[in-house]
Image: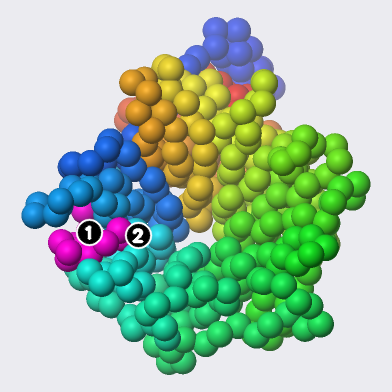
Amino acid sequence: MIRSTLVLAVSLVALHLGAPAAVAQHQAFFEWVGDLPGGQISSSPSAISADGRVVVGSSDAHPEGVATPRARPFAWDRGTGITALPTPVDWGPCYASGVSADGSVILGFGADEQGRSLLVRWFDRAGPFRLELPDPQSSVDTVRLSDDGETILLHLDDRPYLWSLESGFVALPSIPDRSGIFQSRALSGDGLTVVGALSDQQGVYAYSWTSTGGYVELGQLPGGPLYTLAYAVNTDGSVITGFSRTNSFQFPFGEAFRWESGGLAALGFTGEGRAVSSDGLTIVGNRPGLPGFSGAFIWREGRGARTILSLLANAYDLPMNDWELRRAYGVSLDGRTFIGEGRNQNGVFQGWVASLGCCCPPDWNRSGMADSQDFFEFISDFFEGTGDYNRDGVSTSSDVMIFLSDLLSDVC
């Protein structure tokens, strides 16, 4: 009875007084990626490692001895910031577009000194090591890398290919009984599922493909034209996201969707899903400049959608000032670190990376969600002297206040 009374009393006091979230202890952060020297000030991130530590992309740069600036690949991490990946000076534009789960393998594409298409890799940021394409005169697009760095998806002209060391380049088969062009968009982390869309005179149809199951059409949202694009797929291929046009949403925009074996489900707002976490429960993407809710968004199962900007500013108390987060392109395996593009206070368009921290802090029992059971277990540990929530070395009432503030907020 005494313990329950104390719990209730401490809880009421904490709720009455309130407390700022312990953002510093949770290591949430927001940073601009920066840019490479020379050329226009710009950077565009394209992929993030599964552990959220390495970001790759391209930046306008001006290599020494070259007359004009050109796109150059970069890698970014919090320790060293943005660094240029080694690239021959006389090569044309070059882009980093994929990274392995641990950040050790980076994939890129571009053009060599003769204008021929390139497919290259860097290992521990050393390289580049070139892979010979089936046709160097082909146009290369949609270059993706599996989590283990051993499978590559690329689109050559009008056909998708998979590459592995064992099999080399293997073209995906055509979709049975369908004409038109299949544009591949993404590769699952395990390297087994390809997603994209087929376009013909009747419309655009989203598909997934595996070597065992072949092509599967994802379907359409009701009440709209035949136009659905799949942009991203999770680690095991079980969840896919993108957008589908319906009559409920203003052309040319569509409604963001989430697909799993049960079918296509609308997320309930105009936008496009561009990346999905490993468990399929977090989706990030872009929403057009419409009043009230625009820019880079995050959608989470059971919590709905909000802008990443508002999440960082309000739930994590990060100083976002006048920055605009226009687009989100990638998310880490755990769904807690994101990349995208936006404009800073000076109006400069650059890449950004944001993280909600290493875990969901009020999920005290690490069950995967923060709920009342976490409260009871935390209070029990607190009275045992092991409830050091803010990690300052002691268990005090401050830990209870911060824990309750986080539990009742949208910090996760």
Q: Quadrant of residue 199?
A: bottom right
Residue wearing tag 2:
96
Q: Earlier in the sequence, mark 1 or mark 2?
A: 1
Callout 1 environment at 10 Å: few (<14), some (14 to 19), or many (20+)? many
Asked whether, in this view, residue 375 is left or right of residue 327, the answer is right
For the residue pair 242 and 105, the one nearer the viewer reads as 242
Q: Secondary structure at mark 2?
A: strand
- Compared with 208, 89 (above or below) is above
Q: What is the residue that sits farthest to the right in this orientation?
A: 223
Q: Quadrant of the N terminus?
A: top right
Question: Residue at position x 59%, y 43% from top?
Answer: 285
For the residue pair 372 and 149, the one nearer the viewer reads as 149
Q: Quadrant of residue 410?
A: top right
Q: Is residue 90 one of those drawn in magenta?
A: yes
For the residue pair 356 and 216, the one nearer the viewer reads as 216
Residue 77 circle label: none
Question: What's the distance in space between the residues labelled 1 and 2, CA to CA?
Answer: 9 Å
Q: Is residue 246 one of those drawn in magenta?
A: no
Q: Amino acid at mark 2?
A: Ala
Asked whether, in this view, residue 290 is left or right of residue 33, the answer is right
Instruction: Evaluate whether residue 325 shows in this view.
Output: yes
Q: Quadrant of the C terminus?
A: top right
Question: Residue at position x 34%, y 59% from top?
Answer: 95
Question: Residue 380's x, y, as percent?
Answer: 57, 34
- Contact, CB < 8 Å: mark 1 with mark 2? yes
Magenta segment, which residues?
82-94
